Amino acid sequence: MNFPAELLKQCWFLAGPTAVGKTATALHLAGLLNAEILSMDSMAIYRQMDIGTAKPDTIERSKVPHHLLDLVDPHQDFSMAEYCHAAVDAATDVVLRGRTPLFVGGTGLYLRAILRGTFDGPSADWDFRRQLEQDALKLGPEELHRRLTDVDSVSAARLHSNDQRRIIRALEVFHLTGVPLSAQQNNLPVAVSDRPPAVAWLEPDREWLRTCIDQRVNKMMDKGLLEETRRLLNSKPPPGRTARQALGYRELITHLEDDVPLPQAVELIQVRTRQFAKRQHTWFRNLEECTAVPVGTDPSAEQLAERIHRQFRGN
């Protein structure tokens, strides 16, 4: 599906890597724009997963209305196309009430899908998927990534080897159609005349962000991330594969289920989060519609919001 062009031109976007300060900046920017915030985070769609996904808290949500959070339970699947349909509905509702939709998040795939549309593709072949899942368990996720490289090198280049769900979908599309998924998707940038007023991404100082990430993980642990993960595992029905693979939860699940020492699991969260932030940086830097907003080592959310507002309000 494609986001309606006239609706897209009424939306603002604030992206950036994890821990860069998007939430605080967005709250100030929303005030300047008379906006409501629409989450652009692929894990914040899950209920019961609050600390690990760094969802806005009750106070933050009371300041500015938030949308596209807590859409499904952790055992459920939720496709990118479903997210886009929900995003269109939410943005349309915001516009009809005379306010500005402000999309905020770090999921590059969601941002690109909103800007350039999605390819829904053929229906799932569950037997084929189950076979691939068994192969991944037996041979490791790198094997599926290698197979995807053989048939769709473009999709393989943009997907991390641990992104099993999307790798399986790309292999499935090729299996069912004989055509690479990348060849069926619209990867062309939005024409300048059709672009939103602002597609900004916060580009931080790398060493500063590294420190922020490590501190943020420690704060999440202090807030009860381990207990939240334990509750998630004990929920009925249990969390599905996508929820279990969420950054932070996956590592703590290995502590709870496989006896990995807790300090080791926490350190692994920090390492993988830093790696994830680097991939996010690459995503936004390479998305032509995005404009970088440099972030120094001591950013003020209010000043950042004002700078973004001044920079893009005339577009």
Image (spheres, rainbow, N blue to C red):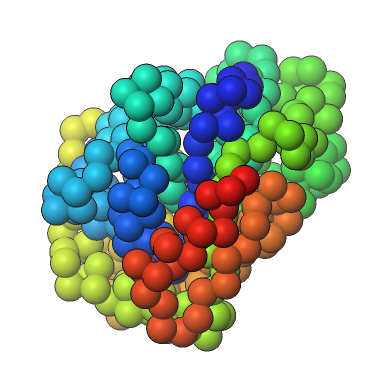
Total number of numbered discs in the rendering: 0
| Residue ID at (45%, 42%) | 103
Q: Nearer the viewer, residue 262 or 209?
A: 209
Q: Residue most toward the top?
A: 123
Q: Position of residue 140 (x, y in %)?
A: 61, 53
Quadrant of the snapshot with the N terminus: top right
In the rendered image, the vertical position of residue 295 relative to residue 241, given as above or below:
below
> Residue 188 appears at what percent x and percent y?
79, 36
Residue at image coords 17%, 73% = 222
| Residue situated in front as seen by the camera: 268 or 128 | 268
- Name the image quarter holding residue 252: bottom left
**Direction front: furthest residue:** 314
Q: Is residue 72 above or below residue 35?
A: above
Position of residue 301 relative to residue 93, above or below, is below
Locate residue 99 relative to residue 169 in the image: left or right. Answer: left
Q: Is residue 105 visible?
A: yes
Q: Position of residue 66 (x, y in %)?
A: 28, 40
Identify the residue at image location x=62%, y=23%.
5
Q: Is residue 287 above or below residue 95?
A: below
Residue 243 appearing in the image: no
Nearest the viewer among 16 and 101 is 101
Res. 169 image quadrant: top right
Where is residue 132 drawn, in percent x and y? 62, 35
- Left or right: residue 137 versus residue 181 is left
Residue ID at (18%, 39%): 235
Q: In which quadrant of the rendered view does residue 269 lie?
A: bottom left
